[in-house]
Image (cartoon, helix red, strand yellow):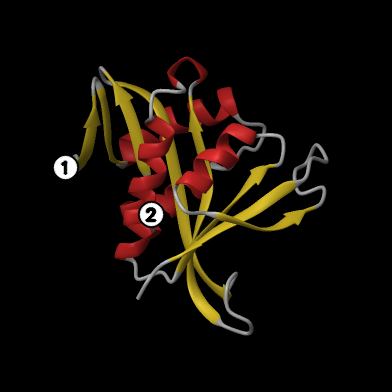
Amino acid sequence: MQVILRQINDVIIRRAEPSDLIPVMEINLKTLPEHYSDYFYESLLAEIPEAFIVAEVNGKHVGYVMCKTEYGFSNFKRLGFVKKGHVVSIAVLEEFRKKGIGKALVEESINGVKLKKCDEFYLEVRCSNTEAVRLYEKLGFVIKQQLNAYYRDGEDAYLMAIEFEK
């Protein structure tokens, strides 16, 4: 059963289903250098479907965000151990960028990890991706640290995080 979360003009933002995994993998292959196994996508959808979100235009998949939950040291509290949401991957096809789709995907993934009672939410983003960094900052994320040579090609990443109010 499709759970439509919002609509922006002709773009439908909804929770992913198993039938969405192949189109999501195809978007990943077209847009990002980091790729994952089929099982990895399936496991994330099974773990936290509330934060595995797809964007469609007229039935065509144009973007996605997939997340996971984990326990670890807080990005905000010294010595705090918390439940965190983690954006594993987000992508929008190039021809559909700058239409609010990425923003809607992140906002809905925030809602999804909140449903899982996470204390904070974080992601890694290429330091060179200034548009994405600006978007995340507008949504309340802050740069917590720079991760040197984080990506396979040697580029640095920012670890950005947002803390949720209790």
Nearer mark to the viewer, of 2 and 1:
2
Image location of residue 96, percent across then percent down: 43, 19
Which is nearer the eye, 51 or 43? 51
Instruction: Indicate the quadrant containing the C terminus: top left, top right, bottom left or bottom right.
Output: bottom left
Which is nearer the eye, 69 or 123? 123
Identity of the residue drawn at 33% across and 52% down? 49
Q: Are marks 2 and 1 in contact (CB under 8 Å)?
A: no
Q: Quadrant of residue 102?
A: top left
Amino acid type at image mark 1: Met
Badge 2: residue crowd in 10 Å (few <14, some 14–19, many ≥20) = many
Image location of residue 119, percent across then percent down: 43, 71
Numbered tag placed on residue 1 in the rendering: 1
Q: Which residue in the structure is indicated by mark 2?
A: 110
Q: The residue tagged with tag 1: helix, strand or loop?
A: loop
Left or right, 160 with reference to 135 = right
Q: Is 84 rendered above or below residue 34? A: below
